[in-house]
Structures are given as structure tokens and as C-alpha cells.
């Protein structure tokens, strides 16, 4: 996990952050000359939610509410949604009306927030300690959360209003035994496969990715497969290729990224050989990777090296080729996210308390810093809408 608890936040308002520093293409990706006489269309600002820790020195006071300019990447802070403790990770309901946050504390919980009026709809206990990740099942009916401190995965029903019901299931990772240097299981992420058929939980403590079937009626999880990494890998984060047959697994402890094969029928993940993060020769804890919507490029956040690694995706997702690294212009990038149109990448830098924004060149995969990073206390998650 490395570091204090953290969060993500974004709100339904307008946004901005911007001018460029050389690092790639000379103009914003996707821009084109307009026909003579055609009026310039200024894109409307978009919401950005920022997560933080509220219980650490210098931390935030809740979920940060900001907006960003989709053309320039400029961020403008608007407000803070208080009343949510240690909101270190955020997720949006598929209908776009409700935001969910983990409460990363010893007595872990998850909280629902209605975006229309910023009303907190209530919290539910996760049955474990320090939940650090959550995601909404594609059906919109279930919220999945990972308890890092307890090595368990919780399932909560989502009502018609977006509010959460009592916990439907809690599964603890009791096997295999913890990996080298680990005192127990540490569930770090829980996601649904692209086809919606399986739920996968990444456990840093047991060096294992667990595959489950989710009962759509009851919310119960049934384990169907385990994929074990090399001892000491410390898997943290799994991201699927859009093709649905491959995924990329970040090894926090082993400083690696691995291409995995995925079988949608069985839910089984096949772990390949670890690859370089581009941060060789120093202490580095890779955090998260994202894949462009067209499946051509992967970007990886390196904490310690303080960089973003760039990979070209080859062989329909089966191979990654390291293109190089770009300084993140911050300290300890805990989480990264792409804007919905894929033209911007946001990096939440925990130790520097900033959010860096980069223009993404869709043709080359180049990243170009979009001006000075935006200050945000103990920034651990950025969710652009």
C-alpha cells in the first residue's frame, strides 16, 4: 500500500487548469484547424472530484470539488464536501447521479453522495479495516469494496435512490499464505471483468488475484479461480484491455507490471512474466495503470521514481513495449485517471499535495504537462467526469 490513506473526489460543476510545458507534441491532441468563418466553440468546464485523507497532518477536510477545462487541462477549485472521513478512493454510479467513497479507517465504511444536491445519503460498514478501493458493478445494483487492512472484499446493494443497503456479503482471503514480508492478506482492489461475468480481487498480501462469480440476485460471491504471482510481487492494481482478453497487473512490492491473459468463460487469469516499470535502479512502488479507450497505450504511475511510464500495446493487448518515462511534476503519484474523452491524464500526487494534468497525444502516446500542478491537500485520487 505504501503511505497514508488517500482519496478521490469530483463534483457536478465546471472546471479548468493549464498552459503547457514541453514534453511531447506542440499542440493539444485532437485539435484541428477550423474552417474559415466557423465560430470557435469553447468547451464547457467539467466536474473533477478529489480524494484525500482527513485524519493525517496537512490532509483535506473532505471530498474536493473542482472543475477542469477539457481543452487546456486547467483545474479550478470550487468547494469541499465535508462529512466523509478519509475518502481515499471514489467511484461513480453508471447513471452518473451518485458518487461513492471509501472511508479508509480502522472501522471501514463506504459512503454514498447524491451529486445533484451534494447530499450524503449515508454510510455502511464494510466489515473490515482500511477499505482503499471500491467500484460499482456494471449493473448498477452492487457496490464492491476492498478492505486493505483485513484482506477482505465486501458487497453492498445499491437502491433506486443510489443509497446503500446493508452488506450482502463479505469474503476474506485466507489462502494462500501471505507472501514474503507480509503479515496477512491485503485486498487492494476489486473490479468487474469487461464482460460483466466475474469479479476480480487483487490481494497484495497473498500475491494472488481471486476470481469470483457474483450472484445478481443476492450479491453473494463464489470463488472460481486464483491466479498467483511470483512471491514478493505484491500485486496492487489490475486494468483490463478493451478487448477483454488481457489485463495489466501492477506489482507494488516487486516494482513490475505484468501482462495477464484472461478467459471470460472461466474467469481465470493467467499471469505472465514481470516487465520493467522504467524505474530501474532505485526505490519505486508502482501504483496504478490506465489503458486508452482504443487499447493502443498504457500509462503507469511510479511512486518513488515520480514518473509516468508509457507503453505501446501490441499483439491485440498481449504485449507491452516500454516507450519511456515522463516526470510527473509531483511527489508520489498514488493514482492516475484519464478524462472521459481520453485527451487528458490526471495524476494525484500524495506527498506533494498536488494534481498534475497532462495532454495525451492519441497518435503517439506522448504526454505533455498542462501547466503548473493544482494544489490539493494529500491528493490520493482524482476523478474527472
Image (cartoon, helix red, strand yellow):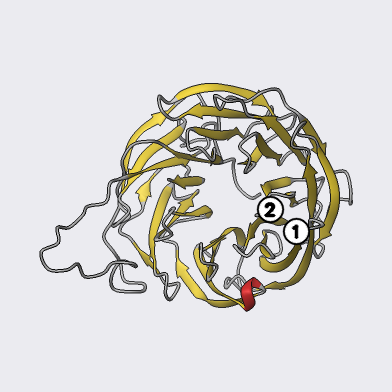
Where 170 falls versus 244 (above or below)?
above
The spot of residue 70 in percent (x, y) is 33, 53
For the point 73% across and 35% down, the residue is 154
Q: Identify the residue shown where x is 70% and y is 22%.
A: 166
Name the spot of residue 44 as percent of width and height, x first: 28, 46
Q: Secondary structure at mark 2?
A: loop
**Does dot 1 land on a helix, a strand or a loop?**
loop
Find residue 272 and report its image quarter. bottom right
Residue 357 locus on image (x, y percent) = 38, 56
Asked if marks 1 and 2 touch (Cβ < 8 Å), the reply is: yes
The answer to which of 142 and 82 lies nearer the viewer is 142
**Vertical placement of residue 276 versus 199, above or below:** below
The reply, left or right, for residue 6 in relation to residue 147 is: left
- Looking at the image, is 163 positioned above or below residue 92? above
**Of callouts 1 and 2, the N-terminal one:** 2
Classify mark 2: residues with Cα within 10 Å, few (<14), some (14-19) or many (20+). Answer: many
Q: Which residue is mark 1?
A: 264
> Alpha carbon of mark 1 to alpha carbon of mark 2: how far?
8 Å
* Position of residue 87 in the picture relative to residue 251 (left or right): left
In percent of width and height, residue 299 lies at 53, 65
Q: Quadrant of residue 233?
A: bottom right
- The answer to which quarter of the image holds residue 79 is top left
Residue at left offset 67%, top offset 48%: 191
How many dots with numbers? 2
Q: Quadrant of the C terminus?
A: top left
Foreground of the two, 270 or 159: 159
Left or right position of 357 against 189: left
Specify the label residue 193 is tagged with: 2
Amino acid at each position: 500500500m505504501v503511505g497514508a490513506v488517500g482519496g478521490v473526489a469530483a463534483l457536478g460543476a465546471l472546471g479548468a487548469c493549464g498552459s503547457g510545458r514541453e514534453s511531447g507534441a506542440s499542440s493539444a491532441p485532437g485539435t484541428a484547424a477550423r474552417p474559415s468563418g466557423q465560430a470557435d466553440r469553447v468547451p464547457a468546464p467539467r466536474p473533477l472530484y478529489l480524494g484525500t485523507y482527513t485524519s493525517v497532518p496537512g490532509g483535506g477536510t473532505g471530498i474536493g470539488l473542482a472543475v477542469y477545462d477539457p481543452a487546456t487541462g486547467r483545474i479550478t477549485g470550487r468547494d469541499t464536501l465535508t462529512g466523509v472521513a478519509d475518502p481515499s478512493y471514489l467511484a461513480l454510479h453508471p447513471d452518473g447521479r451518485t458518487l461513492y467513497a471509501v472511508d479508509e479507517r480502522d472501522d471501514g465504511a463506504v459512503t454514498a453522495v447524491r451529486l445533484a444536491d451534494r447530499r450524503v445519503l449515508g454510510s455502511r460498514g464494510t466489515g473490515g479495516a482500511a477499505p482503499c478501493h471500491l467500484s460499482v458493478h456494471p449493473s448498477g445494483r452492487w457496490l464492491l469494496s476492498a478492505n486493505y487492512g483485513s484482506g477482505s472484499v465486501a458487497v453492498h446493494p445499491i437502491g433506486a435512490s443510489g443509497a446503500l443497503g446493508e452488506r450482502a456479503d463479505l469474503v476474506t482471503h485466507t489462502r494462500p499464505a501471505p507472501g514474503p514480508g507480509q503479515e496477512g492478506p491485503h485486498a487492494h482492489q476489486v473490479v468487474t471483468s469487461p464482460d460483466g461475468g466475474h469479479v476480480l480481487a487483487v490481494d497484495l498480501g497473498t500475491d494472488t488475484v481471486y476470481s469470483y462469480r457474483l450472484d445478481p440476485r443476492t450479491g453473494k460471491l463464489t470463488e472460481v479461480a486464483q491466479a498467483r504471482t511470483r512471491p514478493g510481487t505484491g500485486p496492487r492494481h489490475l486494468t483490463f484491455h478493451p478487448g477483454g482478453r488481457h489485463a495489466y497487473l501492477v506489482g507494488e512490492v516487486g516494482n513490475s507490471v505484468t501482462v495477464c491473459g484472461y478467459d471470460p468463460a472461466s474467469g481465470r487469469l493467467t499471469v505472465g512474466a514481470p516487465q520493467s516499470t522504467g524505474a530501474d535502479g532505485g526505490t519505486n512502488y508502482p501504483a496504478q495503470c490506465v489503458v486508452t479507450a482504443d487499447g493502443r497505450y498504457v500509462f503507469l504511475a511510479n511512486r518513488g521514481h515520480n514518473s509516468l511510464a508509457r507503453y505501446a500495446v501490441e499483439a491485440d493487448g498481449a504485449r507491452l513495449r516500454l516507450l519511456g518515462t515522463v516526470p510527473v511534476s509531483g511527489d508520489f503519484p498514488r493514482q492516475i485517471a484519464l478524462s472521459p474523452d481520453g485527451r487528458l491524464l490526471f495524476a494525484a500526487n500524495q506527498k506533494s499535495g498536488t494534481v498534475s494534468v497532462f495532454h495525451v497525444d492519441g497518435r503517439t502516446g506522448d504526454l505533455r504537462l498542462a501547466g503548473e500542478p493544482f494544489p490539493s491537500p494529500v491528493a490520493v485520487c482524482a476523478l474527472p467526469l
